[in-house]
Amino acid sequence: MPCSRSLSQAVEVSKSSVTYDADDEKASLSVEFRLIDGQDVNGVEARTAEGGDSVPATWEGWINEKRIPCAWMIVVDISNPARKTTIGKCREAVKDFIDEISEKDAVAIYALARDLDERSSFRPGTEGAELKKAADSLKPIGQAALATLIYRNLLEGVKKLGDRPEKRKALLVLSDGKDETVNKEQQVKDLDQLIAEAKKAGVVIHTIGYAETGGDQKFFHGLKAMSEETEGLHGAAKDLPEGHLGLLHSVMGGAGKAHLDLAGLVEADAPGDILLSLTTAKGEKGSIEVPVEEVKKAFPKDTDGDGLLDKVENLTGTFEGKDATGTDPEKADTDGDGLSDGVETGTGEYVGVEDTGTDPNKEDTDGDGLSDGAENGTGEYVGAEDTGTDPHKADTDEDGVNDGAEVEAETNPLEAEKKRINPVLLYSGVCLVVILILVVVMIRSSARKKRELAAQIAAEQERETALMEEQPRREGALAWLEMCDGEQTKHPVPITNLRIGRGRHNDLVFRNDSVSGNHAVLEHSREGVWSITDLHSGNGVIVNGQQESQAALSEGDIIELGEIKMRFLLK
């Protein structure tokens, strides 16, 4: 509910003036406000609404250079020549008001009769002399028979004030309150519209009622309503002391900002409503209830819920330490290895599932072809997704074969002495035995035959190696990947879904530490479009110099996967 105030009531905070400014770096919250009656605030205290625990609070008053600038529109009702004496009093009150105006304020002066008539456009407070000249022009004009449409004319003034840049805006109305709209229902609508527009524009309406007779005060109800609804002040001129308008300067420019230190609440992780109490220079009390929603804004944020504060996840892609992790504050698992960024502490030492010591920006910290998430350090091998190996050692059991190769060969990467027979190794052994037999035969033969046989075996091995590297389906290639090096080796793309990476299970394998185990996939759509997609790799996919998560490919595009650089060809 808006505040209902008069110039003679006790202290109360203008609810529409209350604003909050949270700083989650310092765990602090500033509460800015003004008092409706303009008194000076001497001090503030703050406590939690639940429990009554003290919250450190300091007060910063807005005086002199810290005073908040205000745009004033002064409107004086000059209708009816019979009100000459009353209008003269209004004119002098306005001039006194101008004498006390702040240099930071801007003032415009308007006369109100049948229409709203500008006597001075907005001028800075330093141009008091010009403003007083405009005030001197406020003299009764017109005919008493002409209707004065107060609410409609003031609506025009509110709209003008709404366009002003000043943080605070005030409409000061000096009138007898007699709105002479013939249709009373329309008169009520005009008043309601005026109040609604003032609230929307942030305009406070202060009203002073000047009555010709005691009975005329019954017309002040409209003036009082517009002040009450916009948190302004209203009073009858006859009840106010000399110089009463000067109070309005402190009303609009005064009060200040309370600074709350929420470090204790943050440490206890106990956000809640806070009751802010204030004491004025006169010893009067006031209060503001700070809602928990505003309090929470001062708490350090962890947007992705990974246990790391947003301020340390600086998105550089390089882990520099616990205060600069290089991770994405909107992704709980930046490198896509199945581990939350918060547990990948980058220490280089595996402690446990809550402190893996791995790099949160690299899917495979030790480069063994297994993701950090699979290498869970339990010391027990379950399978390819739960290897139990150390994510900081490429060869956990130190048997000369890295963990990724052992998993691919279906041997236990944790047991150097208990390997299952690998079909590939068995085949290699048989081949070795055959070669040894041939060597024995060659020894028994002449030296010439021995050299010829050795040359024949070497040539055969070279041809077999070449065939393996070139792949058997060159003739049916749909596209080509040409290496950007001195040899310009061409790798055929014989299928519409080609997986590329360091792991042996890929269709195209690059044994290079800069390439992830599952780095990217090259795809050909039904519509005939080629594209490449990054599979959350450590070094990403770069197409024509631009890092992409997915990109369409055209003839001649340059693709970079870590240190591997290729040209995409369709012919």
Image (spheres, rainbow, N blue to C red):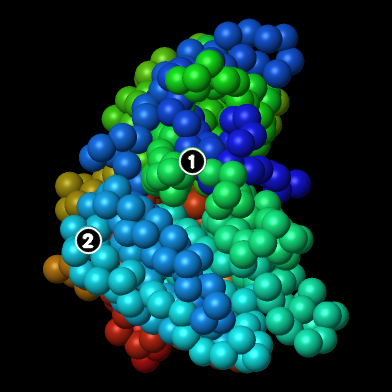
Instruction: Say what amino acid the circle numbered 1 marks.
Output: Pro
Q: How many marks?
A: 2
Q: CA distance from mark 2 to mark 1?
A: 23 Å
Q: Does residue 148 show up?
A: yes
Label 1: state its secondary structure: loop
List x then y, in percent, for residue 248: 45, 47
List x then y, in percent, for residue 108: 36, 70
Which badge, 2 or 1, is on the more N-terminal residue? 2
Residue that numbered label 2 is attached to = 128
Residue ID at (61%, 25%): 286
Residue ID at (62%, 64%): 212
Identify whether 518 is placed above or below 483.
above
Judge by depth and name the residue closer to the eye, 551 or 562: 551
Q: Quadrant of residue 566?
A: bottom left
Identify whether 532 is placed above or below 321.
below
Residue that numbered label 1 is attached to = 241
Q: Residues within 10 Å of mark 1 (few under 14, many from 20)?
A: few
